Amino acid sequence: MPSHGALDVVSQKLAAMLCDKCGQLQANQRNLLVVAAATPGYSLERIAATLRFLKQRADAKDEVFFVQRGVASAKLFLNQIDALSALLVVTVEHATLWPNPNARRPLSPAFATLLADWRLGCHA
């Protein structure tokens, strides 16, 4: 799990993807980011911890961290990430939904429930 100083490999990938995609989110819309992952490890706890890590870096005004990841500034990241309604990570085994508690426009409860209950299976 992410700590104040470092991210594990899965969390690094997740953080890089979030920094890359946050600028594409529409400010006045509900935004669901869907990630198809070939490897497991994207637990709800890891997703939440990675977002906390990113917010800590932004709150600390770590401009270098965000510029290195393609975001113009820490302040811009904070503004953009709150446009994310939820993150859905799909692997072969399951789907993990992380609803953004700070989203300006959260998913509707019915849609969030549908996504949270979504399970995928392999068909031979």
Image (cartoon, helix red, strand yellow):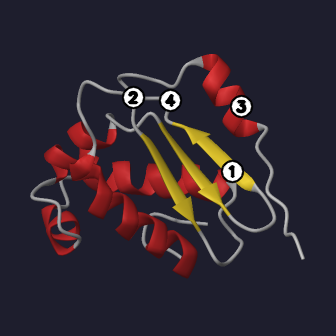
Q: Position of residue 80 (x, y in %)?
A: 24, 41
Q: Which residue is mark 4?
A: 101
Residue plotted at (17% across, 60% down): 71
The answer to whether residue 40 of the structure is visible from this angle is yes
Residue type for callout 2: Arg
Q: Which residue is mark 3?
A: 114
Instruction: Give neighbour class at mark 4: few <14, some 14-19, many 20+ (Cα, 10 Å).
Output: few
Q: Which residue is mark 1?
A: 96
Q: Which residue is mark 2?
A: 30
Asked if the residue under mark 1 is in contact with the one under mark 2, i.e. CB atoms within 8 Å, the reply is no
Question: The N terminus appears in which quarter of the rendering?
Answer: bottom right
Left or right of residue 108: residue 58: left
The answer to which of marks 4 and 1 sits earlier in the sequence is 1
The residue mark sitting in front, 4 or 1, is 1
Q: Residue furthest top?
A: 109
Residue 72's mark? none
